[in-house]
Amino acid sequence: MSTSLERKLWLAAQADANLQALLGSGAAIRWGGMQEPQGSIFPSVAVNVVSAIDQYSNTDLLITALYRVQFTVFDTNAERARQVEQAIKQFLTMFNAYSPAGATVLRPNRVVMRRQGGDPQTDPLTYQRIMDAMIWNNEQT
Amino acid sequence: MELRRALLVPDPAAEFGSMNQQLIRKAINGVMPRARATGLLSSICTFQMLSGTRDQDGPVNVYIDVPGLVGIACQRAAPSDARIQATEQKTIGQIDSSNLWHVLLDNYYNAVSVTLPDGQVVSGPQTAMRAVVDGVPFDVLGVEPDSQEQMTRVQLQKVTL
């Protein structure tokens, strides 16, 4: 049975030193889920699959699908939120859900959008950094 | 204090008719002293405003006490005693949960002149301020003095994710 892209991202994030330092380590890492969990410690990251594109040849369904994944960083400290955003960018230089990891494989991730946001209802304002990345995923691994 | 109609309506024939308005004023003036005497105003409220310092993200989250609006005795209560208010709002991104309080201050504070960091002069508590009640900061949603200038009521909110 294959592993979902969300789980691959979650497991890989736990192994990333930069993300660990900002988001906690192990399964307690504040990463994943579509929503910011209520009462969460900041910073934390919600990971939302916006869309996925499956590709077909003239005879078959190809094993790789292209996902648009939206990372939303939540933090009450704007500068720290930007640090998490940078850590995710760095994380995507190493993350590979496309093929078995190796020195020669491609990691063709692509960030297609980055912007800031915020929740003004809270005091202080809860800052958000929102990043959309296109990530290839091997649907059979 | 109960006022009978004979005291409220001017009556030239009445021996002490000229005292009517003074009695009403005296009754009104006695409202807050009696409220304070009950001991129910057991919380402490301090209004704070942003220091005016800014950085690349706008106002820095540093608050300073508002002169004249510090250490005010108050009573805080839920805005409705009839039912729990549903204040949780769910979106895909996050869940906002708001905590609302209705707070009665121990006196009329809308005459206190306050100079904000930007130089603007205002009177009394403002919605641009925050209120720290018993050590917990709240956003000020509204300020309401009474028409007889005896008391000030504020509506407070704290939103958490």
Image: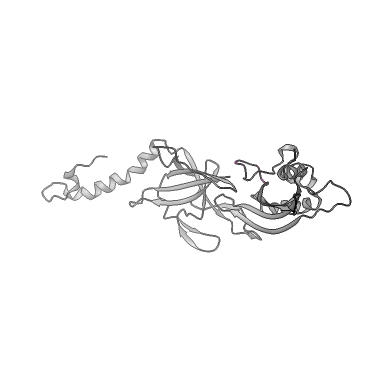
Q: Is residue A136 magenta?
A: no
Q: Which quadrant would the C terminus of chain B be assigned to in this image?
A: top right
Which residue is found at the position 64% from the left and 53% from the top?
A: A128
Residue B28 place in picture, x, y as percent: 30, 46
In front of the other: A59 or A44: A59
Task: Please indicate, yes or no, whether residue B37 appears anywhere in the rendered image.
Answer: yes
Residue A78 place in picture, x, y as percent: 66, 54
Q: Which residues are magenta?
A: A36-42
How many marks overall?
0
Q: Which quadrant would the N terminus of chain B be assigned to in this image?
A: top left
Which residue is found at the position 89% from the left and 52% from the top?
A: A104
Which residue is found at the position 51% from the left and 55% from the top?
A: B128
The residue lying furthest to the front in this view is A59
Q: Is residue A130 left or right of residue A104?
A: left
Task: Please indicate, yes or no, whether residue A67 appears anywhere in the rendered image.
Answer: no
Residue A10 place in picture, x, y as percent: 73, 43
Q: Is residue A98 left or right of residue B21?
A: right
In front of the other: A10 or A17: A10
Which residue is found at the position 48% from the left and 62% from the top?
A: B121
